[in-house]
């Protein structure tokens, strides 16, 4: 450290042995030695002064910031006068106000232009990067996952009647008398005032991931234009029902609907379009599509699954019901049916072509 005034200024302190206050201190510290040794007795000494600045992002140009700074430091008094090699012009100040502009070209490079000390223009370029991507990724702060503050479907007569008629356990699901109003308590402003005028009761199918409620489906109990409505609390979470209740290291049956999945062991249900279940830990999926050989959508999805090299259930000719729930209502042993009709690769293609002609 150079001898002389330290850059940090503060209130004057008293000397030992109750000596009087002083407005100055020695230019050379008692601990001063050649070679830049720290001058501990000069730290946090001297007058108090205000130092600060403002930075404002300019809305008309993304990445452009305006900077304004008040700097009262006298650089001639900043340990320079005692040196024979002091360059006066570099330390002279004509103003305590500094202004500047900073423009981020991208996440790695920034250009800064400034006018400081009332007499000097500065232009600088900053380049920053890291070899560790985790350091450059901003953490995503997520709100605490809400709880499912609803009664079980078994507590409502209409919901229980519907589910039990389909041989579905009503204790596995929930009930919301006013679905849209309740949804707005979980995901604000999902439904507007005009939507709330036409609220309706729905069975609630919760979607959990890592023990957190990340979304839910509402199944209409009364005639509705939309039978199922899927709401995601966490948009980055999987739209999958039952993911927290499976053995991911074993074959996992992937059905088209949550109700169907309740009849098959170690199964999940997609609550949207087919996705990559592997990213959620399912290493050996077995896809169970509806038994509708004349549906272009179903046949296209089965064909894509076979092309990906994944396993698929192709129902035999003696099964006429269109989905798992209907098969249960017809008295079939669906667990045995799906386990004995799993195909993959060339064999899947042969069975698929036969099934399409039914």
Image (spheres, rainbow, N blue to C red):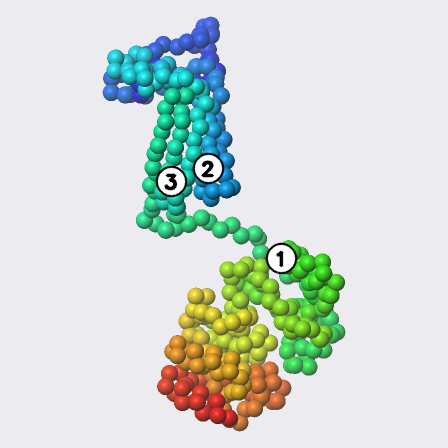
Q: Earlier in the sequence, mark 1 or mark 2?
A: 2
Confirm or deny contact between disc 3 and disc 2 (CB under 8 A). Answer: no
Front-most of residues 70 and 203: 70
Structural distance between the alpha carbons of marks 3 and 2: 11 Å
Q: Position of residue 131 (x, y in %)?
A: 32, 49
In front: mark 1 or mark 2? 2
Residue on which disc 3 sits: 110
Residue on which disc 2 sits: 65
The reply to whether residue 294 is in sight is: yes
Q: Secondary structure at mark 2?
A: strand
Confirm or deny contact between disc 1 and disc 3 (CB under 8 A). Answer: no
Q: Is residue 216 left or right of residue 159?
A: left
Quadrant of res 44: top left
The reply to whether residue 262 is in sight is: no
Name the residue at 43% across, 66% down: 279
Give the vertical position of 241 relative to 138 (above or below): below
Q: Position of residue 334 (x, y in %)?
A: 54, 85
Q: Position of residue 203 (x, y in %)?
A: 67, 70
Quadrant of res 129: top left
Q: Earlier in the sequence, mark 1 or mark 3?
A: 3
Name the residue at 47% across, 44% down: 62
Structural distance between the alpha carbons of marks 1 and 2: 34 Å
Q: Which mark is residue 187?
A: 1
């Amino acid at each position: 450290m150079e001898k002389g005034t330290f850059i940090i200024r503060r209130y004057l302190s008293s000397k030992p042995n109750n000596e009087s206050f002083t407005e100055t201190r020695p230019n050379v510290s008692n601990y001063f030695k050649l070679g830049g040794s720290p001058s501990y007795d000069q730290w946090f000494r001297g007058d108090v002064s205000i130092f600060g600045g403002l930075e404002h992002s300019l809305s008309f140009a993304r990445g452009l910031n305006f900077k304004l700074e008040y700097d009262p430091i006298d650089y001639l008094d900043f340990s320079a006068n005692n040196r024979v090699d002091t360059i006066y012009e570099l330390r002279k100040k004509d103003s305590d106000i500094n202004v500047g502009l900073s423009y981020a070209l991208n996440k790695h490079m920034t250009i800064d232009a400034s006018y400081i000390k009332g007499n000097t223009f500065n232009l600088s370029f900053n380049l920053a990067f890291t070899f560790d991507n985790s350091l450059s990724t901003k953490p995503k702060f997520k709100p605490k996952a809400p709880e499912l503050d609803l009664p079980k479907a078994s507590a409502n007569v209409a919901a229980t009647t519907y589910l039990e008629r389909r041989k579905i356990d009503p204790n596995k699901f929930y009930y919301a008398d006013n679905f849209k109003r309740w949804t707005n308590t979980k995901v604000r402003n999902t439904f507007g005032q005009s939507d709330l005028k036409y609220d309706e009761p729905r069975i609630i199918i919760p979607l959990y991931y890592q023990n957190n409620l990340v979304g839910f489906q509402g199944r209409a109990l009364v005639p509705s234009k939309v039978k199922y409505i899927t709401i995601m609390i966490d948009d980055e979470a999987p739209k999958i029902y039952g993911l927290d209740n499976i053995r991911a290291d074993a074959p996992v049956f992937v059905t088209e609907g949550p109700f169907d999945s309740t009849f098959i062991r170690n199964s999940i249900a997609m609550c949207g379009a087919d996705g990559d279940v592997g990213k959620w830990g399912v290493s050996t999926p077995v896809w169970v599509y509806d038994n509708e050989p004349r549906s272009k959508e179903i046949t296209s999805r089965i064909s894509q699954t076979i092309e990906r090299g994944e396993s698929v259930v192709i129902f035999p000719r003696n099964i006429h019901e269109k989905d798992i729930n209907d098969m249960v209502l017809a008295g079939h042993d669906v667990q045995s049916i799906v386990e004995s009709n799993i195909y993959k690769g060339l064999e899947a293609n042969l069975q698929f072509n036969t099934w399409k002609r039914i």
